[in-house]
Amino acid sequence: MVGAALFEAMGWHASDGVPPLEHLKDDVDDDMAALDEAAEAANQGNTLFSYAVLLGLLLYLGACYVAFAFPPEAVPWEVEFAIPYDPAAMASNCSVAFTRLPAITSSRVLAYEIAALSDTTMSHQVLQYTIHVDDVLVLTDLAILPRNETVAFTTHELSDLSFGHHVASIELLVPLPGGHEERIATTRRFTLVPDGHKVVKVVLPTRQARKALSLDALVAASRPRIVAPQNGTVLRFHETSDRSVRVRYRRPSDGNTTLLLDGRPQPLVLLPSPTEWMATTMLADVGPGRHVVTLLVDRDVADHVTFTVASEKVDAPM
């Protein structure tokens, strides 16, 4: 029944007798052609996939070669995992200094002390230091330093050190967070003399001669003050004359200047002056009596004087 249905689908009926071979051959050829096309398409897909896999493998091998032949620069773990900070704003609490090394000595042993005080650790610190005398390395060593006290050290006897002037220096190397280092150094000048040598003269520092100040420079360096009128002056005016008082004062090098007459600010109308350091102004209509002129620089009192204005009567015409 299934075969008859298949033949009927191909255009043959049971009433026709034996199915024609031409129909069977054509159907087989069509099926083979379809299979060939499917196989060719599958081969093309497999080829592209193979090329893609090969290209990826070549790229991976190339990356491995580059990473092996040109490795990146190694970064110390102290730098890689350090907390960002400004090295210029950070310093240790360590110090180094010479002790018992006067300017003139007969001892060939250098005494010094190193301190590594710290409140951030409970353990000792191991620091490296070097000592030079006249730029020649004398000693390099590691010091085990406690965190809460200063440790004293001495060098061996410097038997090859000649008599005369010398310069000794100590440099302490302190590691800081982030891979940075701090170099703490100190220098001391001294003169080595034979044992029992009497010191009869000490070379004192050369006295530097100072340049003499000119009059203008001397005036400029002096403090602001009132030059006129002088303290205790009595000024006499006729009743009909203009009672104006001339005030001269030394200008300040900087700051604002204010004149007070009996505690009241006065307008400053500056008159021509022979020097830039002196100023002249007029206080108009000053009444008879005792008055006080005060010179202020900014808000500070620089000077004050007291003067008296006396009024003289004019005789009536006959």
Image: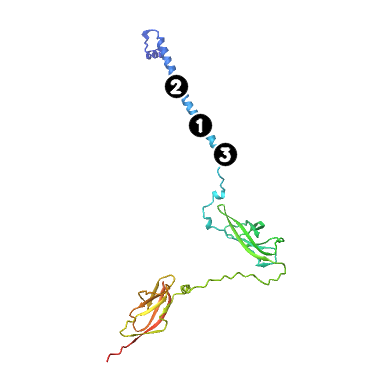
Q: Is residue 83 above or below residue 166?
A: above
* Sequence-earlier tag: 1 or 3: 1
**Residue 96 visible within the image:** no
Residue 43 or residue 155, whichever sits in front: 155
Can you give x and y, in whole percent of width and height, for residue 18 in the image? 40, 8
- Image quarter for residue 258? bottom left
The image position of residue 144, as x and y in percent, is 64, 57
Tell me the mark number nearer the camera, choosing from 1 and 2.
1
Q: Residue at the spot x=40%, y=77% of the render?
A: 248
In this figure, which residue is indicated by the disc labeled 1? 55
Residue at mark 2: 38
Q: Is residue 228 left or right of residue 87?
A: left
Q: Are marks 2 and 3 in contact (CB under 8 Å)?
A: no
Q: Quadrant of residue 181?
A: bottom right
Where is residue 305 shown, x and y percent of the image? 41, 80
The answer to which quarter of the image holds residue 260 is bottom left
Q: CA distance from mark 2 to mark 3?
A: 47 Å
The mark nearer the N terminus, 1 or 2, is 2
**Mark 1 in CB contact with mark 3 (< 8 angstroms):** no
Q: CA distance from mark 1 to mark 3?
A: 21 Å
Quarter of the image where the C terminus is located: bottom left
Secondary structure state at the residue bearing disc 1:
helix
How far separated are the C-alphas under marks 1 and 2? 26 Å
What is the x, y in percent for residue 301? 42, 75
Instruction: Tell me which amino acid carries mark 3.
Output: Ala
The residue identified by callout 3 is 69
Q: Amino acid at mark 1?
A: Leu
- Amino acid type, residue under disc 2 in the picture: Ala
Nearest to the observer: residue 17 or residue 243:
243
